[in-house]
Image: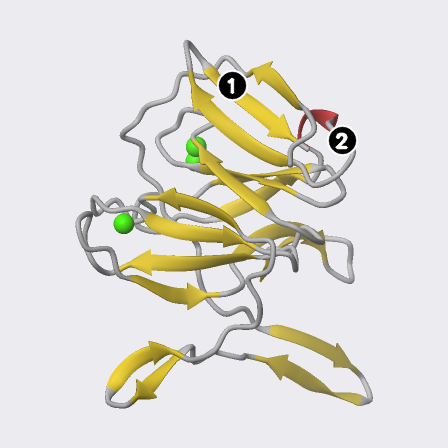
Amino acid sequence: MFKAKIIFNIQVAFSLFLILGFSLGTPNYSTAGEEQPILTYNWIPQFYGKMKGETKLLYTRSFARSILRFVDIDDDGDDDLFVGKADGRIAFFHNQGSTTTPIFKLITEDLVVIHEGVDKQSNSILIQTILDVGNNAAPEFVDIDNDGDFDLFIGSKDGHIFHYENRGNKLSPRFFRKTPIYMGLKFGGNSVPLLAILTVTELMIYW
Ligand SMILES: [Ca+2]
Ligand SMILES: [Ca+2]
Ligand SMILES: [Ca+2]
């Protein structure tokens, strides 16, 4: 159970009709050395298969300590589903049904985001990577910068609030890591950010 809560005014007007989308996909990881072959990881999970003639969800790793967030990520009028997990990652289910008959299809167990990094010459580069906050990911979506697309906040086991800015657009949204410690806040553990519509958008963090 939640032990406490704290509320911060962020002074950002919030629209109910915001558009968002996600950068979803399978990243490529590679390491290269002069004497080593390039190792490439390009695993595409096959979650579904046939069972007695029907398509069923046959495979997942784990959805322990799930934190669910429903949001219409593709602006088609029905809510899609994001699931924060104990492994610190976020799974995405696309609603391929409707508002009255939702059919959630697992697209990825590991949402992909963009981080800033440096190359061997210390030049700034952008790195596509699996979002991972350590343990107990708790996602929340809000257009915190009021530019028309949802941004992403994630609570974590260590009590930090991660902030990802959506720098994409309606057709190709992409989440960039702004900070792993939003507003310098750190709580005792298992933070769960929630954003509510009052006179302004307020960030409520439970832990
Ligand atoms: Ca949708
Ligand atoms: Ca935004
Ligand atoms: Ca944006």
Residue 202, disc: 1
Q: Residues within 10 Å of mark 2 (few under 14, many from 20)?
A: some
Residue 129 locus on image (x, y percent): 60, 60
Residue 145 locus on image (x, y percent): 47, 26
Viewer-closest of 39 and 72: 72
Above or below residue 6? Residue 102 is: below
Above or below residue 116? Residue 96 is: below
Residue 136 locus on image (x, y percent): 65, 50
Q: Type of residue at label 2?
A: Lys
Above or below residue 153? Residue 108 is: below
Residue 72 visible somewhere in the drawing = yes
Q: Dot 2 corresponds to which residue?
A: 186
Viewer-closest of 26 and 199: 199
Q: Residues within 10 Å of mark 1 (few under 14, many from 20)?
A: many
* Placement of the N terminus among the 4 image quadrants: top right
Query: Measuring 51% from the left and 65% from the top, which residue is drawn there?
Result: 109
Q: Type of residue at label 1?
A: Glu
Residue 127 visible somewhere in the drawing = no
Ligand 2 neighbours mark 2 (CB distance < 8 Å) = no
- From the viewer's perspective, tell me whether residue 72 is left or right of residue 188: left
The image's colouring method is secondary structure
Residue 68 locus on image (x, y percent): 47, 47
Query: Measuring 69% from the left and 84% from the top, which residue is drawn there?
Result: 38
* Placement of the C terminus among the 4 image quadrants: top right
